[in-house]
Amino acid sequence: MKAWRWAIRMAAADRAMDNDVFRNAYGLHQAGRLAEAARVYGEVLAANPRHFEALFLLAMVHLQTGRFDEAERILSLAVAVDPQSADAHSARATALDRKSVV
């Protein structure tokens, strides 16, 4: 098999793994199992640090649990990945606002 075909198949396999792990994290998040969801979002990000949805939703877990500094830090990374995301900018503003109140 040519090296580039192998590389394409491996990249697809990595994305599929990322997606399966991400779906697991999202399910945990939806079930209110926030600590577990945060851990699994972290696994997704260990494999792909630019996974926008994992960054954004991990930050949402931190907002939900009052960890505003960490939420803002992660949302900054999400904005760097997708500067056009109004949701990420808005959530970052919320985190900054909450940080200033605490």
Image (cartoon, rainbow, N blue to C red):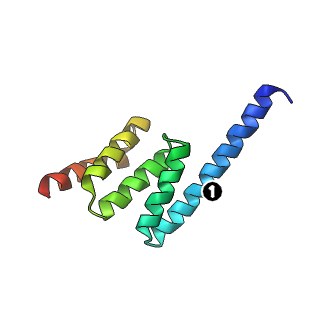
| Left or right position of 67 against 100 | right
Q: Residue at x 47, y 65 (%)?
A: 36
| Left or right position of 35 against 43 | left
Q: Position of residue 74 (x, y in %)?
A: 36, 46
How many marks can you see?
Answer: 1
Whether 2 is drawn above or below 82: the answer is above
Is the N terminus in the top left, top right, bottom left or bottom right quadrant?
top right
Is the C terminus in the top left, top right, bottom left or bottom right quadrant?
bottom left
Q: Residue at x 43, y 48 (%)?
A: 55
| Left or right position of 34 against 98 | right
Q: Position of residue 67 (x, y in %)?
A: 28, 58
Which residue occupies the extreme left position in the image?
Answer: 101
Q: Residue at x 56, y 44 (%)?
A: 47
- Going by the numbered disc 1, the residue's amino acid type is Asp
Q: Provide the residue designation for mark 1.
A: 20
Helix or strand or loop: what does disc 1 sit on?
helix
Q: Position of residue 94 (x, y in %)?
A: 24, 53
Q: Residue at x 50, y 47 (%)?
A: 45
Query: Residue 68 sits in which quadrant?
Result: bottom left
Q: Position of residue 33 (x, y in %)?
A: 44, 70
